[in-house]
């Protein structure tokens, strides 16, 4: 007996399908619009498949090789219809493709489900829901399909309410391909709105290479077709065919930026893995660059199908200003954010992307200095975070980074570490730096006096990230970073190849003659300071505060305190310049009270010029005033 294919039959879903359908509807509900992505990408695949099969048999085209996907909606009927003129399916294919889940490991997958809704939702995302996602929003799905190259009467209609059974019957269909109609659930009518539907469609189809049309009615109620997408994936074209304007236009769509990008990086990588990168460096920092919740500008495509926005796993945080796309041929279409986590393919793509960006920046610094300047001004502070975040690339990041220094005393950061090393004194082992709250505070710090006198260059750092930068880098090209405000400073010896251990405490015979002054000040200040000593750093200022060699940099400490951290109390060291008039005057002071006041004022002003805050500002002012009055009398 032959089966009458036109007869309607009711068949049961494979058990697994039933389970997966139920699970999917509950767990993917919060992401329901993805059904459009799944159906569009199936339609696009069906066209790709026909294109491929037709290579061997042109008759399959039935006279038309123009592919298209159309979407329409009917408000009255409550339906959305997606149709394509791709390869279509015959009866057996419908049964095996749509009635079963032809995936290996389906059973194991179901066994692994935990019953925990969140975990299962992640898993089902990884598993891939494809066509079944229609049932998130539809309570009935009708699929009409005819395989390309078969008789018009050999088409098939499949219908199901997603409740365990489906019907299948023969029908006549003039056009080849598949037409899927979703009868939307009562609560899902929001998709029956031209604007809403278009918006979702655009999101998922902007860069599908086939044209997607939406049927709408014009003012007079006449049907017309609106083209939804450009239908060309710019990144797949060869670089030499793409005009700058086209790159710029695409940038605007991916970034939602009105301006043009500074530069773009376009690479097709072929090897074990195949993927394309089209990345942009914007000209202006986005408003949310510093926000906790900022947009990551990378869109992920798999085989030209848009998968997700904000694919944060493709770039490290310090490159969060980069915008663009990654298109992979190897990732599964239904990849979820959770799998992105530790996926080897992603790691490879990420490493390449970082490398290409660093290459570009190096090239830009050399060949487009104006653009590089803009880049640095907008993104330098974020970029420097890379030294902490990206250990493998920290030296490259350091070499691309720019700083202010005493060489030019300009606020604009345009000194590289290599420039610094090139200008270094012979035998200089350190890269000296000062960190302060602002450029001016750094530039005018008394701690720099001796460096200026000896013409030793010092980096003037005032970005919050700079502390982390020097503390993580520790050294660059074998030169260690050395804060000018930390530890005993002994430029002459430390820069003349003396043994390291002789560095810690070194007193010149000259210092000895000030021993009694030093110990009197120390007594006067008591518990306020850790120590008092003769400074090697000061030339024109009377005193400065520094920290011990193992203490936390005072600026860093302040920063951490501002961020709410409780920091151990470390007392500063007061360094004095005994050749300064105030110290000479103090040395002659015989009145104890006066001596104590002078010492206290000396200490307080050293704290002030370091950018610190006084514990008792009013006390400082009244002491200072008293001293001025007294001096006036004496004079
Ligand atoms: P996936 O797309 O991940 O394979 P789906 O459940 O979405 O899973 O689809 C199952 C199969 O049904 C597809 O592999 C394809 O063979 C077939 N199919 C789905 N949609 C179409 C379509 N529009 N045209 C032709 N075949 C389709």
Image (cartoon, grey):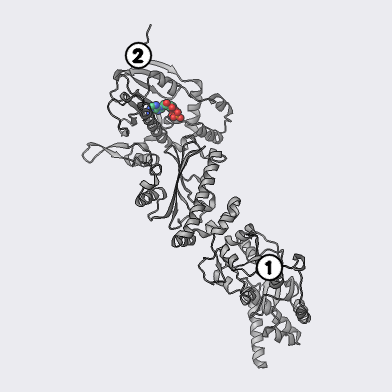
User: Could you tell me how many numbered marks the image carries?
Assistant: 2
Image position of 520 with respect to 341: above or below: below
Image quarter for residue 536? bottom right
Residue found at the far top of this picture = 1
Image quarter for residue 74? top left
Ligand 1 found in image quarter: top left
Query: Considering depth in this image, is 262 or 495 the residue closer to the camera?
Result: 495
Residue found at the far left of this picture = 220
Query: Considering depth in this image, is 551 or 21 the residue closer to the camera?
Result: 551
Locate residue 344 relative to residue 306 in the image: left or right.
Answer: right
> Do the residues bearing badges 1 and 2 touch, measured as CB atoms within 8 Å?
no
Give percent across and percent down for residue 263.
43, 54
Mark 1 falls on what kind of element?
A: loop
Image position of 491 with respect to 394: above or below: below
* Precedes in sequence: disc 1 or disc 2: 2
Residue 233 in view, yes or no: yes
Give percent across and percent down for residue 141.
38, 26
Image position of 391 with respect to 67: above or below: below
Q: Residues within 10 Å of mark 2 (few under 14, many from 20)?
A: few
Task: Tell me the number on the disc at residue 207.
Answer: none
Q: CA distance from mark 1 to mark 2?
A: 90 Å
Locate residue 88 relative to residue 533 in the image: left or right.
Answer: left
Locate residue 268 relative to residue 462 in the image: left or right.
Answer: left
Quarter of the image for the N terminus: give it.
Answer: top left
Disc 2 designates what residue?
7
Disc 1 designates what residue?
486
Give percent across and percent down for residue 430.
65, 65
Nearer to us of marks 1 and 2 is 1
Query: Considering depth in this image, is 571 or 219 the residue closer to the camera?
Result: 571
């Amino acid at each position: 007996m032959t089966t009458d294919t036109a007869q309607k039959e009711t068949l049961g879903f494979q058990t697994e399908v039933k389970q997966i359908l139920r699970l999917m509807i509950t767990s993917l509900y919060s992401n329901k619009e993805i059904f459009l992505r799944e159906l569009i990408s199936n339609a696009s695949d069906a066209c790709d498949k026909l294109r491929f099969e037709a290579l061997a048999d042109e008759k399959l085209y039935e006279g038309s090789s123009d592919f298209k996907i159309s979407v329409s909606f009917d408000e009255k009927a409550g339906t959305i219809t997606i149709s394509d003129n791709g390869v279509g399916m015959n009866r057996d294919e419908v049964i095996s493709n749509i009635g079963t889940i032809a995936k290996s490991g389906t059973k194991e997958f179901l066994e692994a489900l935990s019953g925990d809704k969140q975990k299962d939702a992640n898993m089902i995302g990884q598993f891939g829901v494809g066509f079944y996602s229609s049932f998130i929003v539809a309570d009935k799905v009708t699929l009409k399909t005819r395989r390309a190259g078969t008789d018009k009467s050999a088409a098939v209609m499949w219908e199901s309410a997603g409740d365990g059974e489906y019907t299948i019957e023969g029908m006549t269909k003039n056009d080849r391909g598949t037409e899927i109609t979703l009868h939307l659930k009562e609560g899902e009518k929001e998709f029956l709105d031209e604007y809403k539907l278009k918006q979702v469609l655009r999101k998922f189809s902007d860069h599908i290479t086939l044209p997607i049309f939406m049927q709408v009615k014009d003012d007079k109620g006449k049907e017309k077709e609106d083209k939804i997408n450009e239908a060309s994936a710019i990144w797949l074209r060869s670089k030499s065919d793409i005009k700058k304007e086209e790159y710029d236009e695409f940038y605007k769509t991916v970034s939602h930026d009105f301006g043009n990008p500074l530069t773009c990086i376009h690479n097709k990588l072929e090897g074990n893995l195949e993927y394309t990168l089209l990345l942009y460096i914007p000209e202006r920092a986005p408003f949310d660059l510093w926000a906790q919740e900022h947009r990551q500008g990378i869109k992920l495509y798999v085989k030209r199908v848009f998968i997700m926005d904000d694919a944060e796993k493709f770039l490290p945080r310090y490159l969060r200003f980069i915008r663009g796309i990654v298109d992979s041929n190897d990732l599964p279409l239904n990849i979820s954010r959770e799998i992105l986590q530790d996926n080897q393919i992603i790691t490879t793509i990420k490493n390449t992307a970082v490398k290409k960006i660093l290459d570009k920046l190096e090239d830009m610094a050399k060949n487009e200095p104006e653009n590089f300047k803009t880049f640095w001004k907008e993104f330098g502070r974020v970029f420097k975070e890379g030294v902490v975040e990206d250990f493998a690339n920290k030296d490259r990041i350091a070499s691309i980074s720019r700083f202010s220094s005493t060489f030019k005393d300009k606020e604009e950061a345009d000194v590289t570490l290599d420039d610094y090393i090139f200008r270094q004194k012979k035998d200089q082992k350190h890269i000296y730096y000062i960190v302060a709250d602002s450029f001016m505070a750094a530039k005018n710090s008394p701690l720099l006096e001796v460096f200026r006198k000896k013409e030793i260059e010092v980096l003037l750092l005032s970005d919050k990230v700079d502390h982390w930068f020097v503390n993580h880098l520790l050294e660059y090209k074998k030169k260690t970073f050395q804060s000018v405000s930390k530890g005993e400073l002994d430029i002459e010896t430390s820069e003349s190849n003396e043994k390291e251990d002789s560095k810690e405490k070194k007193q010149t015979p000259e210092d000895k003659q000030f021993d009694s002054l030093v110990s009197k000040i120390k007594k006067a200040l008591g518990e306020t300071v850790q120590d008092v000593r003769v400074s090697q750093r000061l030339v024109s200022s009377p005193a400065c505060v520094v920290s011990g060699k193992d203490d936390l940099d005072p600026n860093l400490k302040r920063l951490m305190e501002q961020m709410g951290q409780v920091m151990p109390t470390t007392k500063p060291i007061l360094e004095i310049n005994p050749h300064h008039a105030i110290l000479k005057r103090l040395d002659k002071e015989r009145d104890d009270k006066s001596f104590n006041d002078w010492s206290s004022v000396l200490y307080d002003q050293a704290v002030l010029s370091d950018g610190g805050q006084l514990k008792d500002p009013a006390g400082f002012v009244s002491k200072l005033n008293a001293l001025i009055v007294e001096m006036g009398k004496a004079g």
